Image (cartoon, rainbow, N blue to C red):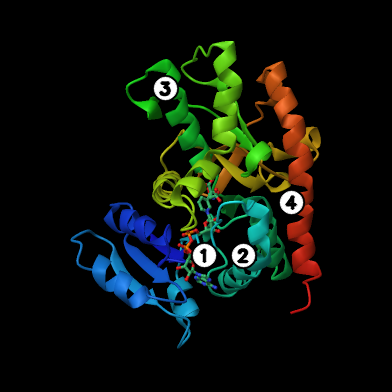
Amino acid sequence: MVKAVVLGASGGIGQPLSLLLKASPTIDELSLYDVVNTPGVTADLSHISSIAKITGYLPADDGLKKALTGADVVVIPAGIPRKPGMTRDDLFKINAGIVRDLVKGIAEHSPKAFILVISNPVNSTVPIAAEVMKQANVFDPKRLFGVTTLDVVRAETFVQDITGEKDPAKTVIPVIGGHSGETIVPLFSLAKPSVKIPQDKLAPLIKRVQFGGDEVVKAKDGTGSATLSMAYAGFRFAEKLIKATKGEKGIVEPTYVYLPGVEGGDAIAKETGVDYFSVPVELGPSGAEKATNILGDISSDEKQLLEACKNGLKGNIEKGIEFVHNPPPK
Ligand SMILES: NC(=O)c1ccc[n+]([C@@H]2O[C@H](COP(=O)([O-])OP(=O)(O)OC[C@H]3O[C@@H](n4cnc5c(N)ncnc54)[C@H](O)[C@@H]3O)[C@@H](O)[C@H]2O)c1
Ligand SMILES: O=C(O)C[C@H](O)C(=O)O
């Protein structure tokens, strides 16, 4: 039996993500939570003739507790999205507190659940989640994931313009680092099967993956950021994790984890100088079972990208940790 929970289920990501989860045969029970509109979203999805039994809650009457009790997987897309001209870090002021409070609920009501953080800025919200779980003495680094799958999905899609490959998802491209601008490091040199990218097309391609989010924010013109592609990406990661926890072997996905708590992660943390980093992680019954160190295999150009990434990430991580220990006055 697998119970999945979506926190922020009525939003732009939350609704299509909940739809995909409701339709997935890997899920037996789905619980939706949001501060608004969950009754309507739940009633609508409840008419779909799939396996998952669905419930939905608002904050009243212990809604968060009811949604989380018995959860195996909790996905968090709660929080505000960007508008043109904003960075993901500009969302910190509001989203940091939202993620902190929701994770406090997880620590209390479903401390063993796998936690998948989508809310931005992911580079900081994942350290926030970790610190909250640590304070409650229930932190298991193998069970906490920053969802960076959209960067992988974009790399697969955008490279197709160059390779002409019919099915973009057949090309596996590791994307490492964090989830914002220059902290996103796509490694086209390690694509499998290998891809031939003309030198003049490589830099624009990398930039497009790093700033793909801006493209959508601009096109949506003040009404939000990526929601549908994110729901696809979030579902893809959640479903792979669920399959791995059910015993399927060989599932490896890039995800932003607390490296010192994952096998193989210490060496990567030493090499990068940061404790939180997205790398291809082998998923299994206990969650993040092994971090793969591919840093030794990357090209010299990619090493330069990595330097910019590390510098950006450090500040984002520290900001998240600091927020939990010294919260700003209300
Ligand atoms: N990780 C990624 O790759 C990625 C991709 C796209 C968007 N995002 C981020 O995901 C977040 C959500 O984006 P969106 O477009 O769905 O926004 P949205 O505004 O459409 O939806 C957010 C939802 O969160 C709900 N919410 C707010 N506070 C809450 C709380 N305390 N408890 C429960 N629910 C709460 C809102 O009511 C709303 O329904 C943003 O922070 C965005 O930047 C991340
Ligand atoms: O760009 C954003 O703000 C949303 C998301 O992080 C994305 O990459 O699309």
The residue labelled by disc 2 is: 95
Mark 4 within 8 Å of ligand 2, using the beta carbon: no
Mark whose residue sits in front, 3 or 1: 3
Mark whose residue sits in front, 2 or 3: 3
Point out the tag, 2 or 3, that comes first from the N-terminus.
2
Residue 50, picture quadrant: bottom left
The residue labelled by disc 1 is: 78
Could you say where residue 322 lies in the image, as x and y percent from the top left?
Answer: 80, 62
Q: Is residue 105 left or right of residue 216?
A: right
Determine which of the numbered discs, if any, sits on residue 161 in the image: 3
The residue labelled by disc 4 is: 316
Cβ atoms under marks 2 and 3 closer than 8 Å: no
Counting other residues with Cα less than 10 Å from the Cα at mark 1, is it few (<14), some (14-19), or many (20 or more)? Answer: many
Amino acid bearing label 2: Asn
Could you say where residue 234 lies in the image, as x and y percent from the top left?
Answer: 45, 49
* Helix, strand or loop for disc 4: helix
